[in-house]
Amino acid sequence: MGGLIKSSVAKKFAMALSGLFLVLFLAQHFTINFTSVIAPDTFNELSHFMGTNFLVQAILQPVLIFGVCFHFIMGFVLEIHNRKARAISYVKYNGSANSSWMSRNMIYSGAVILAFLALHFYDFWVPELVHKYVQSHPEDPTRYYEETIAKFESPVRTGLYVISFIFLMLHLLHGFASSFQSVGWNNKYSKGIQGFTKAFAIIIPLGFIFIAVFHYINNL
Amino acid sequence: MKLTLKIWRQENANAKGKMVTYPIDGVEGDMSFLEMLDVLNEELINKGEEPVEFDHDCREGICGACSLQINGEPHGPDKLVTTCQLHMRSFKDGDTIVIEPFRAKAFPVVKDLIVDRGAFDRIQQAGGYVSVNTSGNTIDANSIPVNKHDADDSFAAATCIGCGACVAACKNASAMLFTSAKVSQYALLPQGQVEATERVQNMVRQMDLEGFGNCSNTGACEIECPKGISLENIARMNREYMSATSKG
Amino acid sequence: MSVFESKIPEGPLKDKWTKHKNDINLVNPANKRNIDVIVIGTGLAGGSAAATLAELGYNVKTFCYQDSPRRAHSIAAQGGINASKNYQGDGDSDYRLFYDTVKGGDYRSREANVYRLAEVSGNIIDQCVAQGVPFAREYGGLLDNRSFGGVLVSRTFYAKGQTGQQLLLGAYSAMNRQINRGKIQSFNRHEMMDLVLVDGKARGIIARNMVTGEIERHSAHAVVLASGGYGNVFFLSTNAMGSNVMAAWRAHRRGAYFANPCYTQIHPTCIPVSGEHQSKLTLMSESLRNDGRIWVPKKKEDAIAIREGKKKPTELSEEERDYYLERRYPAFGNLVPRDVASRAAKERCDAGFGVNKTGEAVFLDFASAIKRYGKEAAFSSGNKNASEAEIIKLGKEVVEAKYGNLFQMYQKIVDQNPYETPMMIYPAVHYTMGGLWVDYNLQTTIPGCYAAGEANFSDHGANRLGASALMQGLADGYFVLPYTIGDYLSKDIRTGKIPTDSPEFDAAEKDVKDKISKLMNASGKHSVDYYHKKLGKIMWNKCGMARNAQGLQEALDEIKELREDFWANVKVPGAAEGKNAELEKAGRVADFLELGELFAKDALHRNESCGGHFREEYQTEEGEALRDDENFKYVAAWEYKGNPRDAQLHKEELDFKNIELKTRSYK
């Protein structure tokens, strides 16, 4: 995939755009999930819509999957290339003197998120596919809420989700703000953007954690 | 002041290097870092050992020759200075100082702490100029007024001394700050507009060919740059590049 | 074989250059492709010459000892570049620039050369702007100017405190364009070790590849030396550590006359020496004298108290301060030429009024400038009743905008905040007006060997005015040499490539290798720096800001002795093959040890004081320089005769037709 987009600047641009797209998706995902806390019926309606709407399923979902894959693969391609760019590493490297931990460890926070995605797919997406296409159950627009909260009975799973969201936060803290720089947006509004992205990066993952813990406690 | 120096020694480009420890005594706070190394070298010479080689020339922070990674940071712990302007008052008695060359695949070691930064020259040869003849038949200097802010921003980008600290600091050994500073200097002036499209594409192409890493916006380059070149230049280059690419 | 004839064209002063350009031979573009030119040094003069020659169509090879052409020491010039553009409408003209330069040079420069310099000065600015050099501008978008020492107009163009870097990057970018076209081959980390003459003409060089240690032969139809000045003969100077006289001295040994070696400029605004370990001196732009006021305490007790740290300079009232330049030179005040300012500082310090630990420093104070600018800024922003604190805050902002980087540099080195307490400054060796003798075409006495920029002697006489070095370097490189060299090369269109396997190349290479092996095989008692520091002390004490016959005579002998000791006992560790910084230094110091002696000889023979050459025996009762136009109105060009002290003097009488010789007065 690194070969498709040749120059370093274009790769960076693509990385930023795919990241921004995933941020949008995250906002949407959060909004729907949050309804599970305040209005289970709305959650069911929205989930049903997302799961059955043709546009969402046939167009948005593939685009999303492509975006996710692109972002991950490109992330790894760039990481490998970057490591090669310094063949002999420093005996002493004081990265904390000039950059944040988050910015230097995007590959690790990203890898954790990837692992989480595997778990998340195993938890929701795979059962959903099995439910819809293998077992061919009739449509039931009210099943989503119960299925969701059932997942949070397990303290281990809830714990894993919480940890993953913390890494998501770290990833977003650098990534969201940084994508504006990558697409060439650094001007007098940048300070405001920075503030917004930082707030987003903290609030959304905290919100996800809240939802997971909320359902776990409710299950007790 | 008594210090312990751990210095990278490497005979030549093909030899295998290693860290060697040297104790040093009698260091004064008024000495520059390089003067401290002068003292060490004088001692080594008198002992019949080979002195430590390092790049240096103007020793007033402008030529960009000096290039030491000191305790894990290019040009050492102080900000907005080159190694030659770093003074020993920034250290204290008993400190251990690790001194390494700037590390990047695109900057191969020549000897000890000296690296080859020819990649920077080649990036500029790829397009870092205005194609105007030096014949003297140009138009009067004041015939094109330039907005003062643009002129100042262009100047700020042009203050880059090409030392390579940005590459050395970057965890990816990326040369984006350097290249973008050069692109920006011209992009901000009317004189640079005519060739803007080719310039940014050619310079980025050469930068990639040299084997530098990618920018991941850690911002380390800006913090470590002795001249304080701004990250805004990288954003500007990204814009210039994408718009140039869309023009073909 | 040497040609010692100035070749100044006939006719009125202001038509000479135009007429000359019309008269000289040109090389047809197709033939230029068959002609090679070597350029040594890639500073303003070398870089601009190389770019222009390549653009004209010649095949150019450039050589520099740095790892990139962009690092040549022109980069360190701070203040600015003069040009008689008269953008400020303050009455400037080519003639005034010419007049100021000749007068500033204490009437020891060649009229025709200086006028040509003034004539092309405006063109330099046009050229640099077209190349994208970001000069300082006013809000209206037009170029800004500042004024400099020794003149009454504002003609200096600048780019904050790093005009040299910006101009050099301009020349380097022009070089890059030609490198990209394949017209320039750039040999970095290469040092010229010798000049090769074939049939009496300069036909190539022997160079050492400083990375591999290989000795290389390079041939060409002409060789341009733009290798800078020799200020490092003093060990401590504002020159770069690597600045050296090797190229020029090798040419001198091969027959090029060396002119006026004793004319050295001591720059008044440098950061004082802090201790024995000091490796070089840092200059702060002379532009600081536009706004800074120079003073020492009036009373010796106060000076002593300040030295011992018992009193702070800010505690002294106006009445307790001696603004000695304003007192002695009311018309020019703090803006007197460099030599005058430097000697005045030395005079005060020698009299016991120095203000730092070593007693060798004077104050440069910005307090009144901060107030003045603060008031202006407050007034123009509509704040008519600004408080003292507001005024000072605004004033500091203005001063920061003008000199921010210099102040920052000072603070880094001295660890004091110059916005709060006056800076301390002291004179230091900065520039050498002397250099290889060249004719009007910039050709040395060796046919085919040219010298440009600081390496030649031509334009600054006995003292250089501020912001004129950049002007001369670029004038030589962009606008003079590329044309005048054509006249010589026009005879070479049928010569063909110069072979490098001739006996002349063999012999020169052998010389170089012998010299290296001699250095590598000396007894090894003392390091190169040991000798260089010793030489520096002799030079500073006996050939420095003030000289006398006795000291110079001593210097002659001491340098000779030191040189002999050096060759017998120097210690060069490591091997000649491969990178070896000590060997590089040794080669350079070896040449300084010869040049130093010629320097002293020249200073001893010149029984007058002029510009940067101040002989204690020749001064007025008030301590001003006393020139002797009757006996010394000439350029002293020295011919190498085996030993520096045996050099033979050739005089080029200076003819002043367009300017009246006066005692330089800045009162």
Image (cartoon, coloured by chain):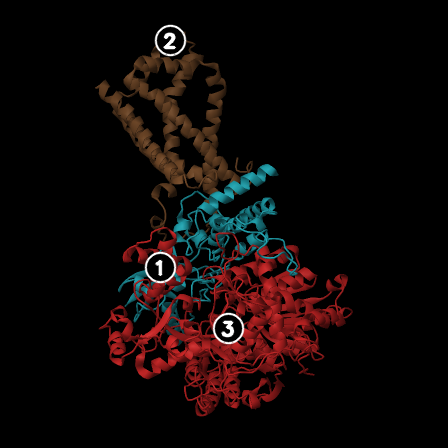
Q: Quadrant of residue A6?
A: top right
Q: At label 3, which amino acid type do we have? A: Leu
The chain assigned the colour cyan in the figure is B
User: Badge 3 is on which residue?
Assistant: C465
* Colour given to chain A in the rendered image: brown
Foreground of the two, C158 or A177: C158
Mark number displayed over residue A110? none
Question: Where residue C386 appears, x then y in whole percent?
Answer: 30, 54
Determine if marks 1 and 3 fall on one subunit: no
Q: Are marks 2 and 3 in contact (CB under 8 Å)?
A: no
Q: Chain letter for red?
A: C
Q: Residue at x 64, y 66 (%)?
A: C479
> Which chain letter goes with mark 1?
B
Identify which amino acid the numbered label 1 is placed on: Val
Q: Which is more foreground, mark 2 or mark 3? A: 3
According to the picture, the residue beneath numbered tag 1 turns out to be B98
Q: Horizontal placement of C256 versus C554: left or right?
A: right
Label 1 with label 3: CB-CB less than 8 Å: no
Give the labeled residue for mark 2: A140
**Label 1, label 3: how many angstroms apart (C-alpha)?**
45 Å
Residue C520 shows in the view? no
- Residue A157's place in the image compared with B216, above or below, is above
Q: Position of residue C302 (x, y in %)?
A: 25, 77
